[in-house]
Amino acid sequence: MTSYGTSVNEDNVQEVIESTGKNEYIVFCYDRQYLEANPEQISTLLDVETPKLESKPATFDGNISLKALQKLLGKQSATQTCDAYLTLFGNFDAYSQSLMKIITHHMQLARQIVEEQKLQSMAINVAMTNLETHNKKKQQCIQPFITNAERELNRQNNLLSSVHNDIEILRHIHVHPDIMSIMDTDKVSLLDYIDLHYIETVRKDTLLISDYLSSEINELRAMSASLDQSEKELQAHVEDNNDLHSLDTLLIDIQEIQQKAQFLRDKIKRDLHRIYGKISGLLNIPLSSLSSSSIQSVTMETSNAQSKKLFETFNHLADIHIKDYMPKLFKYEITIRQRVTELTNSKRRSIQIFTEHMNEVSTIQNDIASVPPRIEKAEDALLQFKQKYGLNDLVIVRDILFSYGALMIELVRRKEYTHLLRNNADLLSDLMSTYRNEEEKRREYFRHKIMRSLPFKLKIADTPSSQCEINTRHTTEPITITMQKQDIIDFISLLRQVYSPVPSPINRPSYSVFNAKPLESSNKSVLSSRMFGKLGDQEENKFLGLLDTMLKDLNNLKLDFLKTMETTCKVL
């Protein structure tokens, strides 16, 4: 993954490789083999990745060498004494050099450990960024599905809850005699026109898809909450274990101690050069040629006053090395070793925590990856249900009720229309006949009073006036409609009692449509909300509203006709 938490794949790998400068990517590679590693493998990994420190140096006791040298003062030649001091300070130098080599190695190791832990911190942050992105995409998948699935689930549950009631209503609603008169059938109630075996099959399938959707909605909602909580807890755990500041503080402390040790090492090295210089001058041997063998070849009397004073200076300087420089340098090495040991332990813990965090990231990512296929499976199941039944699911039982109501309104409306057309046709015919009679009187007057005075005759004088004939065709309906508006009002009132919405929960029956009990009375008043409960929903409200609108149009039929006539007359 890149430092932005973006997975590197075939689509963007070329861009990642070729980007340079400020657009250059930092790429993190994760070894997935340790995601499924057992405790022994993790322990082996920790042992391999935990750096090894240099062996502890031996303690240096310069007092013995210095005391032995001091006992020999005056008993051996000056050249021998010079050689002994060179050896002593050479030992100081060699020991300090060995300590500094260990300190320097541990200093480099400390930098490496801190840098590795910083990279580990960056790597887990990158993984968390990627996880957060995927978790947000998960939410974008789950929420729309839940919204759509709940809408469909509510619809199907409402149909399941009311299908038995709908069937009972159909059972007790007889087809009006006006309609029966034009149908060659012995079916009496609306229920006789329904295939109950088909409805039972649809009901069972609806139960299955509803239970499935309900289960998926609950589980996906719980999974979404669990994933969010897991991400939140993991993020908090990552932040709690991200203590890079203390690592930097520890590294700075090691650097400061290393600088102090280097300062002592430089002093010891400088003192050795000074010893060489003093002895070179005392023995009159070029500094470049000064060695143990060259000193032994020099013939010199027992220490004179000058050499004695110089040897006393050497003793004092050696005493400082033994009591001050060497203990401090040794202590610095021990302190740095302790600090680096803390860092190695920190690295071991860091690797262990890193593997735990990455395992948790992988687990959450796998759970997130399982969401789209699960949603796709649920959507496919719903799609198959829709394709199987289309518009012929349980709603057809409800549709028959409302469609029958609409048919009643339409039949009465057509009867009212025909009646209105006939009555107004006669009225218009009488009106146009009266208007023509007036025209005939005017023409008769013109012929007898005006035409006589004209010096010529015109044929138009005897032309009869135009007349308007109003004919009402196709006004005979195929059936005689005895149905009245009150029948419609009673029917809509019945539907409103059963399907008016109330804020009560829907209880979904689980029994078969064939087990619906017959009503104790054939009186329509028993089909009440008290018996069936309030089952209305948005779809039912829509149909009730449609019937109300159709009934209102029926009641306004004559008024609308008059308004049309009035508007037309105003235009003329």
Image (spheres, grey):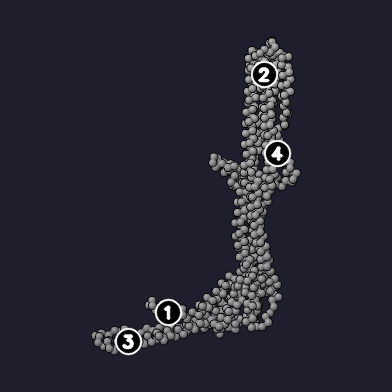
Q: Residue 12: image x %, image y %?
A: 58, 46
Circle 3 is placed at which residue position?
442
Marks 4 and 3 sit apart, C-alpha to C-alpha, by 126 Å
Circle 4 is placed at which residue position?
50
Marks 2 and 3 sit apart, C-alpha to C-alpha, by 165 Å
Picture layout, residue 215 above or below residue 409: above
Q: Name which of mark 1 and mark 4 comes first in the sequence.
A: 4
Q: Residues within 10 Å of mark 2 (few under 14, many from 20)?
A: few
Residue at 70 percent of width and 21 percent of height: 88
Total numbered circles = 4
Instruction: Give, as a three-letter code, the residue at label 2.
Output: Glu
Marks 2 and 4 sit apart, C-alpha to C-alpha, by 50 Å
Query: Label 3's element?
Result: helix
Circle 2 is placed at which residue position?
312
Q: Residue 514: image x %, image y %?
A: 70, 75
Do residues under tags 1 and 3 come within 8 Å of each other at their CB atoms?
no
Circle 1 is placed at which residue position?
565
Do residues under tags 1 and 4 come within 8 Å of each other at their CB atoms?
no
Q: Quadrant of the N terminus?
A: top right
Query: Label 2's element?
Result: helix
